[in-house]
């Protein structure tokens, strides 16, 4: 694996961590005493520090180390989490994002911001606040930076065996950095084992030949020690055993005997070390230590799975085989000792290394989707060939292969789906900053963030959602005084809700603000020449005017709004991904933007139709029903409205819109599709069949043709254009 790929992997991981960081900070803003969120901030800083140093992001490492120390103090109750610290931490998130783009020392504006924040965090740690909680002095701050435990702290002693796989350095990991990070957690003795290093003529620079034993005394708990190895768990043999609840490194009787165990540590040796620790603790009147062990050998696991009686019997048999000269009393004593060892080991919780998910680059997922897409196209061709042969066995095999292809397609697309939560976190920060800037008190609620969408659709949603949120806070939400006068709570509610409905995903963004004033919107639209004074529009149509290019009700231009650019982006980008936008608003009560989106774009189930010697595809997703209709009824229809199943349906005659020159068939068909919660008919010559199709880009020759969203290669090699019914109706219904 090349270093560029490793660095990209680190960047992806870091972006996820920064998202988690912002999420935790937003929780802390409403609940500063949330211990889990404080611990989450600490873990993110700790992880960024370790992984940043591994890939040469030295400024990220030094800065996150500073924040890690501060949040460690907050976590231990030595520093109170104030608004000042929280606001500065929010600013630090932006700085970390900037530092992620450089691999050396910061320069220019970034350097100035870096120095400013380091100074402010340093000042926070130097002073005392009126709460009575002592802030660390300069000397204390140096102590935090080194993470050395004080004599009055509650400390424990751990034995750690770290044996990296020989190829660990090939993915950019330097094991020595991990050893340094361990020692930073407290005080320790490191024993390096270099006996596997070959003669210099046979040394391969990228191979790791060494392993290490470390005895560490620290204030931190087991989970933080494990965090040091978080990126190398699968590439190393790691054994962590707790041997005492005191600092054994201060006891000469322990350190003198320690060398004889190092390098030969096994379960029995660990128990001997624990027994030695017990003797030392008894001598200094310390309570009996915890016998927590992180990991035990496979042999011990096998024994522990048996009943206690089976254990005693097995140990007894082993002793009789190997201790034939001992007396019966001595044998019994040996059995007791072994059972005690097993009992101690059995109390220890195991940490599973199995992972419920894996990180795969988006490039590989895209390649998988492309291969599946080609397979679908080839499958369609195979179906045609099989039908021509009219061979029963071939037809049966083709049908089975088609089922497997469909299952593979569905599974591949499930892999490519990502939760909407990846979008929501970044907007929480936008809402927080914007509401403060506009002096508006806004509470953001998110529901259904585990709803999943195609990665391409998620990326296309970023701009539309940003403009909707900005519009809601700037135009929709009243300030505190206006809300109180209107009899509303001082805090406004901005709600994001995502959910599945059939094969679509809906996203509703609603606020409890002042709603849309239809009179003002209509007047502005007339002033800008978007509609005429005589044009009659219902409330729904007036609401949709705010989605037109150049429309704005702002009286002045600001950094946030007023230029008439923004809401038209919502409609344009949502239509681009074959989605729909609806606006529901009640004056004085609030507004809701409802987005209807497809799950994916690449492969769709479509209806292949025929119009004037050409084949087109209409996505099954938008179709409600299909009915035969006589051509004469279409010609005689008044105002392009026809009755279907006792319901009057407006329709668009595609032969006419496509300027067809051939004679229309006597019997045509109407495909009734959904459009903005309404039903609209599309008149076509005839339906050919339902087909699973791969949608390809139509290229620059059709880039101005809005009615066509893509093209598909059919099984016989012909090309069928995919019709965008929303855009067709938009174009011809006005």
Image (tube, rainbow, N blue to C red):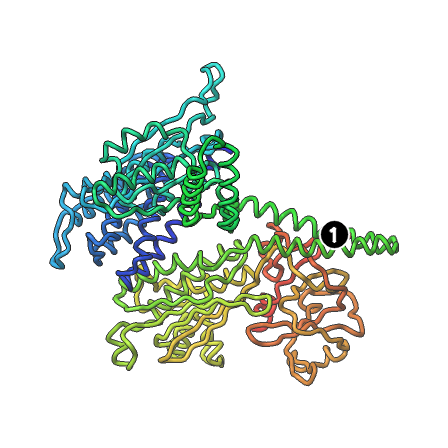
Residue 135: x %, y % from top left: 15, 50
- Say which residue appears at 74% left-offset and 55% top-offset: 402
> Residue 514, position in %: x, y?
35, 76
Q: What residue sits right under mark 1 in the picture?
A: 379
What residue is at 77 percent from the left and 77 percent from the top?
Answer: 630
Please determine whether, in this image, residue 556 is positioned above or below residue 192: below
| Left/right of residue 333 with respect to residue 648 in the rendered view | left
The answer to which of 475 and 637 lies nearer the viewer is: 475
Measured as percent of width and height from the top left, residue 597 is found at 54, 64
Question: In this view of the protein, can residue 117 be seen by the observer?
Answer: no
**Number of labelled discs?**
1
Q: Residues within 10 Å of mark 1 (few under 14, many from 20)?
A: many
Q: Residue 444 versus residue 681: which sits nearer the camera?
A: 444
Farthest residue toward the bottom? 646
Q: What residue lies at 36% left-to-right and 60% top-to-bottom?
A: 428
Q: Where is the C terminus found, in terms of image quarters?
A: bottom right
In this rendered view, identify the residue nearer to me: 458 or 650: 458
248 vs 159, left or right, is: left
In the displayed structure, 346 sits above or below 507; it is above
Instruction: From this view, report whether residue 398 is shown above or below residue 189.
Output: below
Q: Position of residue 342 (x, y in %)?
A: 44, 44
Please tell me whether mark 1 sits on a helix, a strand or a loop: helix
Q: Is residue 269 left or right of residue 455?
A: left
**Is residue 70 shown to the viewer in this render?**
yes
């Amino acid at each position: 694996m090349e270093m560029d790929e490793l660095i990209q992997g680190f960047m992806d991981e870091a972006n996820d961590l920064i998202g988690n960081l912002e999420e935790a900070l937003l929780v802390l803003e409403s609940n500063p005493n949330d211990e889990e969120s404080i611990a989450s901030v600490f873990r993110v800083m700790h992880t960024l520090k370790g992984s940043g140093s591994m890939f040469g992001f030295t400024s990220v490492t030094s800065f996150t180390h500073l924040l890690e120390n501060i949040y460690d103090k907050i976590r231990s109750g030595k520093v109170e989490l104030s608004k000042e610290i929280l606001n500065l931490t929010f600013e630090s998130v932006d700085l970390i994002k900037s530092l992620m783009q450089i691999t050396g020392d910061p320069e220019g504006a970034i350097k100035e911001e870096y120095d400013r924040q380091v100074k402010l965090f340093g000042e926070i740690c130097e002073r005392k606040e009126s709460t009575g909680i002592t802030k660390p002095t300069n000397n204390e701050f140096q102590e935090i930076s080194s993470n050395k435990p004080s004599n009055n702290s509650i400390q424990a002693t751990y034995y750690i065996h770290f044996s990296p796989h020989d190829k660990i350095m090939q993915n950019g990991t330097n094991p020595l950095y991990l050893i340094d990070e361990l020692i930073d957690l407290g005080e320790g003795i490191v024993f390096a084992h270099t006996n596997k290093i070959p003669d210099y003529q046979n040394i391969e620079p990228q191979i790791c030949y060494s392993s290490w034993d470390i005895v560490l005394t620290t204030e931190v708990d087991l989970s933080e020690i494990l965090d040091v190895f978080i990126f190398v768990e699968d590439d190393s043999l790691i054994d962590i055993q707790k041997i005492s609840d005191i600092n054994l490194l201060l006891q000469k009787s322990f350190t003198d005997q320690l060398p004889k165990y190092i390098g030969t540590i096994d379960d029995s040796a660990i128990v001997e070390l624990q027994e030695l620790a017990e003797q030392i603790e008894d001598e200094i009147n310390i309570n009996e230590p915890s016998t927590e062990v992180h990991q035990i050998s496979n042999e011990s696991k096998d024994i522990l799975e048996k009943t206690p009686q089976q254990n005693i019997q097995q140990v007894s048999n082993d002793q009789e085989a190997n201790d034939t000269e001992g007396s019966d009393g001595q044998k019994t004593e040996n059995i007791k000792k072994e059972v005690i060892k097993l009992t101690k080991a059995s109390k220890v919780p195991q940490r599973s290394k199995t992972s419920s998910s894996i990180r795969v680059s988006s490039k590989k997922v895209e390649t998988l989707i492309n291969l599946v897409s080609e397979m679908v196209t080839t499958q369609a061709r195979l179906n045609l060939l099989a039908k021509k042969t009219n061979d029963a066995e071939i037809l049966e095999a083709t049908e089975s292969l088609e089922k497997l292809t469909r299952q593979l397609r569905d599974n591949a697309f499930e892999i490519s789906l990502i939760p909407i939560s990846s979008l929501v976190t970044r907007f929480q920060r936008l809402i927080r900053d914007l509401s403060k800037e506009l002096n508006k008190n806004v509470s953001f609620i998110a529901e259904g963030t585990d709803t999943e969408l195609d990665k391409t659709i998620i990326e296309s949603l970023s701009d539309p959602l940003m403009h909707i949120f900005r519009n809601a806070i700037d135009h929709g939400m009243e300030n505190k005084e206006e809300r109180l006068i209107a009899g509303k709570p001082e805090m406004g509610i901005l709600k994001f809700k995502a959910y599945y409905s059939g094969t679509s995903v809906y996203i509703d963004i609603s606020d409890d603000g002042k709603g849309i004033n239809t009179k003002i919107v209509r007047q502005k639209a007339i002033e800008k020449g978007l509609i005429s004074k005589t044009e009659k529009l219902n409330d729904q149509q007036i609401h949709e005017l705010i989605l037109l290019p150049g429309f704005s009700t702002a009286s002045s231009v600001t950094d946030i709004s007023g230029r008439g650019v923004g809401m038209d982006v919502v409609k344009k980008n949502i239509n681009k991904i074959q989605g729909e936008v609806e606006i529901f608003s009640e004056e004085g009560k609030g507004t809701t933007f409802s987005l209807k989106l497809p799950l994916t774009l690449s492969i769709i189930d479509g209806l292949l139709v025929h119009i004037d010697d050409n084949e087109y595809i209409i996505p099954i997703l938008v179709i409600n029903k299909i009915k035969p209709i006589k051509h004469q009824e279409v010609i005689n229809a008044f105002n392009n409205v026809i009755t279907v199943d006792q319901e009057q349906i407006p329709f668009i005659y595609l032969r006419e819109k496509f300027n067809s020159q051939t004679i229309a068939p006597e019997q045509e068909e109407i495909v009734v599709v959904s459009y903005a919660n309404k039903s609209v008919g599309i008149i076509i010559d005839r339906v050919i069949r339902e087909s699973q199709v791969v949608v390809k880009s139509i290229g620059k020759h059709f880039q101005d043709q809005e009615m066509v969203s893509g093209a598909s290669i059919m099984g016989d090699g012909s090309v069928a254009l995919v019709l965008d019914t929303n855009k067709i109706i938009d174009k011809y219904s006005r």
